[in-house]
Amino acid sequence: MQSTYFKRFRMEVDLAATRLPPALPPGYRFVPWNEALVDIHGRTKFRSFRDEIDAAVFPCLGDLEGCRRLMREIRGKPGFLPNATWLIAHGANPESLQWCGTIQGIAERGGTGMIQNIGIVPGHRGLGLGTCLIERALAGFRVHGLLRVSLEVTADNRRAVQLYQRLGFRRTRTVYKVVDGGVTEQAIEAAGFGTPALL
């Protein structure tokens, strides 16, 4: 069986300095954590990741039930932080409501926060929503007294890496995620990332 290796960066930001979160574009609003929103986070995660490189790296992100299960697992972690877990919605009434973005945060042992997933649904990208979600989550980590926050990103996701760097995240480690079988070159190319290195 052939294995595919995906390079991933662990990145970290220091929250000691005061940060001023940017405002959302008109028509968008933050929706804070609520237990009733677990499924909406899962569905928004699926719509954000299903056609992206991370769905090849983590197959659960390319599957609706997998995203729902992942969201329940994140919610069940002892360090789950509601103040670092947000949705972005667009539309003022039920007929026009669209769930556009999702982010979750947990506190790890040692006093570091960890961003779990940042997803923006296609059609709402390029508006700064990712920046707004990250800054809102970072403010939530600060409420809990955490001054360092980490995340992991697939190295081939250059736009995400550049966004995190712009927001002050610095690479602290490189790791490799092994995916055994099941990932075809066609699946990677369909997500727009070319063929990964096969070792």
Image (tube, rainbow, N blue to C red):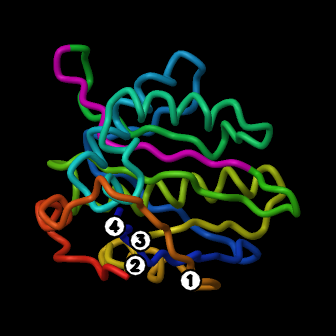
Q: Which numbered dot is residue 154?
A: 3
Sequence-wise, the earlier of marks 1 and 2 is 2
Badge 3: residue crowd in 10 Å (few <14, some 14–19, many ≥20) = many
Q: Nearer the viewer, mark 4 or mark 1?
A: 4
Residue 190 colored in magenta in the image: no
Secondary structure category for the residue under label 4: loop
Q: Is residue 124 above or below residue 164?
A: above
Q: Which residue carries the number 4 mark?
A: 2
Relative horizontal placement of residue 112, taking residue 9 as reference (left or right): right
Residue at 33% across, 30% down: 64
Does the CB distance between marks 4 and 1 fall below 8 Å?
no
Sequence-wise, the earlier of marks 3 and 1 is 3
Quarter of the rendering containing residue 2? bottom left
Q: Amino acid at mark 4?
A: Gln
Identify the magenta region: 95-106
Q: Position of residue 80 (x, y in %)?
A: 71, 40
Q: Amino acid at mark 2?
A: Ala
User: How far apart are labels 1 and 2 at the CA level?
Assistant: 9 Å
Q: Nearer the viewer, mark 2 or mark 4?
A: 4
Relative horizontal placement of residue 91, taking residue 173 as reference (left or right): left
Q: Which numbered dot is residue 174?
A: 1
Does the CB distance between marks 2 and 3 fall below 8 Å?
yes
Q: Nearer the viewer, residue 158 or 183?
A: 183
Secondary structure category for the residue under label 1: strand
User: How far apart are labels 2 and 3 at the CA level?
Assistant: 4 Å
Q: Is residue 83 above or below residue 190?
A: above
Q: Position of residue 18 (x, y in %)?
A: 68, 72
Q: Which residue carries the number 2 mark?
A: 155
